[in-house]
Image: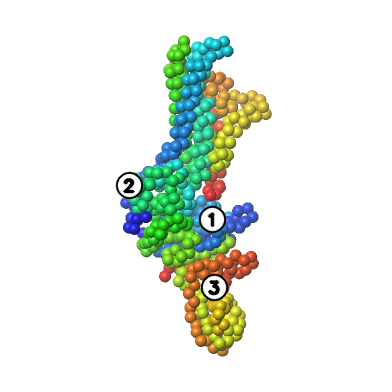
Amino acid sequence: MNDTAIAPARTRPDPTEAVWFRLLRAELRKLTSTKMPWVFFAVLVVIAAINAIAVVFGTDMDGSKAFVSTADDQQSLMAFAANSLMGATLFGAMAVAREYGYGTVVPTFLASPRRHRAVLAQFSAIAVVGSILGCIGGALTMIAVALALPTTDYGFLVPAGVVGRLLLASLYCGAAGAVLGAGIGSIVRNTGGAVAGAVFVLIVAPPLIVQLASGTGAWMPSTLANVLSGVMFDVSTPAAVAGLAVWAVVPAAIGLLAVQRRDVM
Amino acid sequence: MTGHIIEIERLTKRYRKATVLDDLSFTVQPGRVTGFLGPNGAGKSTTMKILLDLAAADEGSATIGGRRYRDLPDPAATVGVVIEANAFHPGRSGRNHLLVVADTAGIGRPRVDEMIDAVGLTVAADRHVGGYSLGMRQRLGLAAALLGDPPVLILDEPANGLDPQGVRTLRDLLRARAASGGTVLVSSHLLAEVEHLADDIVIIADGRLVASGPLTELQQSTSLVRTPTPADLRRVLVTAGADIDAPDGQPDALIVRGLRIDEVGEIAFAAGVAIHELSTHANSLEDLFLQATITTASPGAAPSATLRAPREVQPT
């Protein structure tokens, strides 16, 4: 340290700035100042590349390229919302659990001891980044498929309106998945456990629930994501939006309550 | 700078069946550096966490300036905290860590740059914290604590891993903060450092207060007395409630704890015991700490008399 005495602050907190916006900015900086979003971005690039490879080298059983021959086929291939949901859930779970694991949540709770504000800002920031990652994932997949289609006999057949729908579905599922994951992360607070929890909620639990309660299949997360992408029609689009919101909000609300009640360290 | 009094009142904390804090009470005055001492597991960190609303007490209260931490209007500008030496994301740079803290507290970037320079991390500021030494992490933690220029500092082991120059600068900084009216509570295992630094001492063991008060007063709370009849003097002093030790190789001497020096003289006079010397016996902080904590660490043992009735820390 310097020998000179550490000088008093020349800048003071801006009292007019809402605390919540300060917290949101800090949470966004937390998420963008580590490599984690870039790792997820790299995964999205890999997924897009796999789609492109599938278009270039894949064939149906009869050796034809029928799986990209219609607009509906191409829409199904480019429907990224379910992947967006899964990826963003993992992202949210890891982002929050690592906060507790590394103790970096402590400075946040010291600045905002009424923890619900900090947690809501954290969930909001994760939803923003999750939605961006989801949207990028959807866009990369479409770009990859569009770039690969010239190697086949078929052009890009999906109308602009459907492209917009696919992007919106990926964006919404990214946000919903991120909040769902953040909720799991704040409940479990251990990275490995949070990832396992996310896998359980999205992959293991749905078939078990459907077996136990017939008729619930339409309300499982991946089905709802595919409804939003317009490739499944088990429920209406508004119902799918609401259903995914419930899947996201319930664990987030439990997490919020848990954080407020538990000791931080 | 106007500090705030820290008041810990009848604090009790249990984790399942284990009582970590047991009816703990003490105060920390502004304008003073208070050393917070205790063996590992004594409850120092738990006390600090409760004070900072990071943990909940089962009973009692902990306030800063009469308010719970959560009720402070601007906590980051009121209290600077170093509580966890490794509470950093290893993949985030030191500068970004401070920017996150500054964002949270609504503090501008210029102050971040200023603090990076002040703690000597200018060259390393853009490196990942995962590559920092313990001392560099301590500097980063201190920079974060001082970002809001708070009048109250609560520091858990802040000197751990600092080089001698860093320790010296930290000491000067904390002394200057207290001199300007700030409140400084520092927990540390480095007793020699605390002895140089602290005006007041709070010692806890097994979650209970065993000593508190101005350091110089506590250090001089022991008397050395020489008498030709040590057995007679020992008997009357023990009856009066003193703890007596006999120094090795000095058969005519007794070390008396639990009574003021004038009380020792009056009791000897009243008993008709001749005294050849009566003087204060200055303890090192290490002696004081060991007396307090070893005595209370023994199951069922009572604290030594000097330390049995702790007094509130008062400004001098």
User: In which chain is the residue bearing label 2?
Assistant: B
* Callout 1: SS: helix
Q: Earlier in the sequence, mark 2 or mark 3?
A: 2
Q: Which mark is on residue B46?
A: 1
State the residue lying farthest toward the right. Answer: A212
At x 58%, y 36%, the residue is A196
Q: Report whether residue B26 is seen.
A: no
Q: Earlier in the sequence, mark 3 or mark 1?
A: 1
Q: Is residue A31 visible?
A: yes
Pointers 2 and 3 within a single chain: yes
Q: How is the image coloured?
A: rainbow
- In this rendering, the count of numbered labels is 3
Position of the N terminus of chain A, as image quadrant, is bottom left
The relative height of residue A212 versus residue A160 in the rendered view (above or below) is below
Residue at 57%, 24% in the rendered image: A223
Label 2 residue SS? helix
Height in image: B95 above or below A239? below
The residue tagged 2 is B110
N-term-proximal mark, 2 vs 1: 1
Q: Disc 3 marks which amino acid?
A: Thr
Please state which amino acid type lies under the numbered disc 2: Pro
Chain on which label 3 sits: B
Q: Which residue is more in the foreground, B126 or A244? A: B126
The chain identifier of the residue carrying mark 1 reads B
Residue at the spot x=44%, y=14% of the render?
Answer: A150
| Mark 3–mark 1 CB contact (< 8 Å) | no
Report crowding for label 3: few under 14, some 14 to 19, many 20 or more residues within 10 A (C-alpha).
many
Front position in the image: A21 or B264 = B264
